[in-house]
Image (spheres, helix red, strand yellow):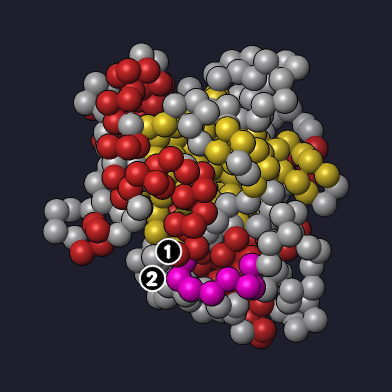
Amino acid sequence: MTYGSSGKVRKNAGVDQLPVIDVGALVNGESDARRERAAREIGQACRDSGFFYISGHGVPPSLLERLDRAARRFFELPLDQKMEISMDRGGRAWRGFFPVGGELTSGRPDLKEGVYFGTELLEGDPRAGLPLHGRNLFPARVPELGEAVLEYLDTLTGLGQSVMRGIALSLGLAEDYFAAGYTADPTVLFRIFHYPPAPPASDDWGVGEHTDYGLLTLLAQDRHGGLQVHARTGWIEAPPIPGTFVCNLGDMLDRLTGGLYRSTPHRVKNVSGRERLSFPFFFDPGWDAEVPPLPSRAAGSPDVIGGGPARWDGQDLRAFTGTYGEYLLGKVSRVFPQLREDVL
């Protein structure tokens, strides 16, 4: 599987409508003009759809290829061997494997299996007792998976900070606004999902319609598409483009900007006839951070803030009060109701 090569991409609505933005200037600290250009393009995409591709990210193709190979080895194991790292063994850290149908989206089982990871905390770290924090469960039968995951977590955390610098500039904020505050100690979650082929006439979704919870999602996907985005013109495809990540905004960035930058519904259906892997990395506010809307001078004119169309699910993000950790825990506990009863 090659993730970093160039290649021709079949033209369709997804490629035409979701822009590809070179973030190299933000990653490499290039000139002010280049960084500001990238920020303008990011801001436009955040207002238009909340989805875009990023290139120039600096993530080595070899790292993605190692991760892909190790993940495929893991998912080829018999179910009883994959269950050796099942999520019920991860306790309050909510780490480990779940089988097909084990995760719910909008109350309905997804047609996928996967593994949950997060920031690896050392023994004695005071955050280790918090929900969704702790040690990862890595498969002893595929030791190279743990090695690749830990390197990927570090690399994508840096990339997340870089993209958030562009988002800060696009909002008229200091470049380090998020890194010095909301993401100084980010909540980092990472998933590897394996989607079996959906039967041609099936109405089962790999992942049903949803929005992401936090600030930013960085998605690597293999060559078998399936991601669909609810853009202004309706549902469009977001197929894999070699050498890029799909980037989308989550509910907390929607809340911070008062709806100027929207978290957009998306879903997955694997109709390729082949197995599909995806690698979503979630870059979110610190666990104890409260997430009030930004000042109107940063998020746009007062008549724009909160003036967009109602959310697809009827939720009012402005109504939430509390910390990001409280918000996230409430969301994730509905995805795994049985696990919630066992560990919380």
SS type, badge 1: helix
Mark 2 touches mark 1? (CB < 8 Å): yes
Crowding around mark 1 (Cα neighbors within 10 Å: few <14, some 14 to 19, many 20+) is many
Q: Residue furthest left?
A: 124
Circle count: 2
Q: Position of residue 260 (x, y in %)?
A: 71, 69
Quarter of the image for residue 235 reads top right
The image shows residue 273 at horizontal and vertical percentages of 64, 14
* CA neighbours of label 2 inside 10 A, class few (<14), some (14 to 19), many (20+): some
Magenta stretch containing residue 316, yes or no?
A: no
- Numbered tag placed on residue 162 in the rendering: none
Q: Which mark is residue 325?
A: 1
The type of residue carrying mark 1 is Gly
Q: Nearer the viewer, residue 135 or 163?
A: 135
Residue 142 visible in the displayed image = yes
Name the foreground residue: 271 vs 298: 271
Q: Is residue 141 above or below residue 24?
A: above
Which residue is at a point 52% across and 28% down the rendered structure image? 101
Asked if residue 318 is among those painted magenta in the image, a careful observer would answer yes
Q: Which residue position holds label 2?
A: 288
In the figure, 25 relative to 203: above or below?
below
Is residue 27 something one can see in this rendering?
no
Q: Quadrant of residue 318?
A: bottom right
How far apart are labels 2 and 1 at the CA level?
6 Å
Tell me if 281 is positioned left or right of 268 in this view: left
Mark positioned earlier in the residue sequence (2 or 1): 2
Extent of the magenta region: 317-324
Q: Residue at x 58, y 57 (%)?
A: 250
Give the residue drawn at x 58%, y 27%.
111
Q: Secondary structure at mark 2?
A: loop
